[in-house]
Image: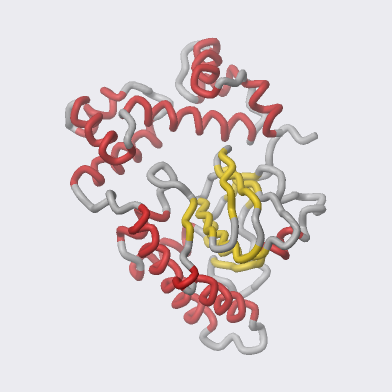
Amino acid sequence: MSKEIPHISFKSSNPDNNGIEILTIESLAARKKDANHNPERAHQVAFNMIVFYTHGESKHLVDFIWHPVKKNTLIHISKGQINRFQFQPGLKGYILLFTDDYLKNQIHTLPKTEIDRLFNSQLFSPIIEVPAESNIERYMTLFDEEYSNLNDNLNQNAICNALYTIIFSKLERLKKFQTHHLKHSEKLSTFLEFKSLLENHFNESRNADFYAIKLHITYKHLNTICKDIVAITAKQFIDEFIVLEAKRLLINSKIKSTQLAYSLGFDEPTNFVKYFKKHTGFTLNQFKKDYL
């Protein structure tokens, strides 16, 4: 058995693609006997994904949490997240894949609120329950038909880009209703800055005071912001971030526990082992065995 999970990069079957692709869940399910990678095994993606289920029922793993899925369930998966399908008979739908570069090129056509809502895995659940009247399936079908049309590719990229903007604008509308509390504000901006600092300095400090000082605010103010935005304290957010990073590194590399501890900023490996057990209920070996 492999000691690490696959790291899946973006490879398009369309030679003229510009960083985006669509495929069906059925076609991906047919690859599960592929010697290189079975999508039903945990894997880390190097791109972004929208998975829209149109028929059947199953469950989908995102960052070590199983989510139930059914007709009109949409799963958003960001670059770097751990992902795993569970294919059941009759399961159908679409998978829209796109790179960070494609997203950056499209940002000018998308509202800033949409980027925050759909591309921030720490802020929201990856699940969106899509009302049938939203017509998301119709636009996904149109995208699939246009992308697959190899006989007439005149303006194909422009058409796909337009359909992408429509799909994401509709998803922003749906996400807005499910996350009505999130509005652009000074608090949200500060929280996103805190998150960015944590991503860059998590191996230097797990102390909320460290980040409050860098933000030029008090620890109390940072705590209030975190409670308002994600309903947990700044320290809890830091711990959740560290644990998730540890999980990803633990099952996606051959790194030894001692190296892992040091890479996450722990002075003593035994302290990391205790920290991980406290926050997950698993020892390092138990966790790896469960997911590999």
Query: Observer-nearest residue: 266 or 227?
Result: 227
Screen quadrant of the N terminus: top right
Q: As displayed, is residue 111 above or below residue 58?
A: below
The residue at 73%/55% (across/down) is 88
The residue at 41%/61% (across/down) is 104
Screen quadrant of the C terminus: top right
Query: Observer-nearest residue: 213 or 78?
Result: 78
The image shows residue 235 at horizontal and vertical percentages of 34, 25
Q: As displayed, is residue 168 above or below residue 203?
A: below
- Left/right of residue 217 with respect to residue 106 in the rendered view: left
Which quadrant of the structure image shows residue 97? Answer: bottom right
The image shows residue 120 at horizontal and vertical percentages of 40, 48
Which quadrant of the structure image shows residue 118? Answer: bottom left
The residue at 52%/52% (across/down) is 77
Q: As displayed, is residue 73 above or below residue 282?
A: below
The image shows residue 146 at horizontal and vertical percentages of 58, 81
- Left/right of residue 186 with respect to residue 279 in the rendered view: left
Q: As displayed, is residue 194 above or below residue 206?
A: below
The image shows residue 117 at horizontal and vertical percentages of 37, 54
The residue at 64%/83% (across/down) is 149
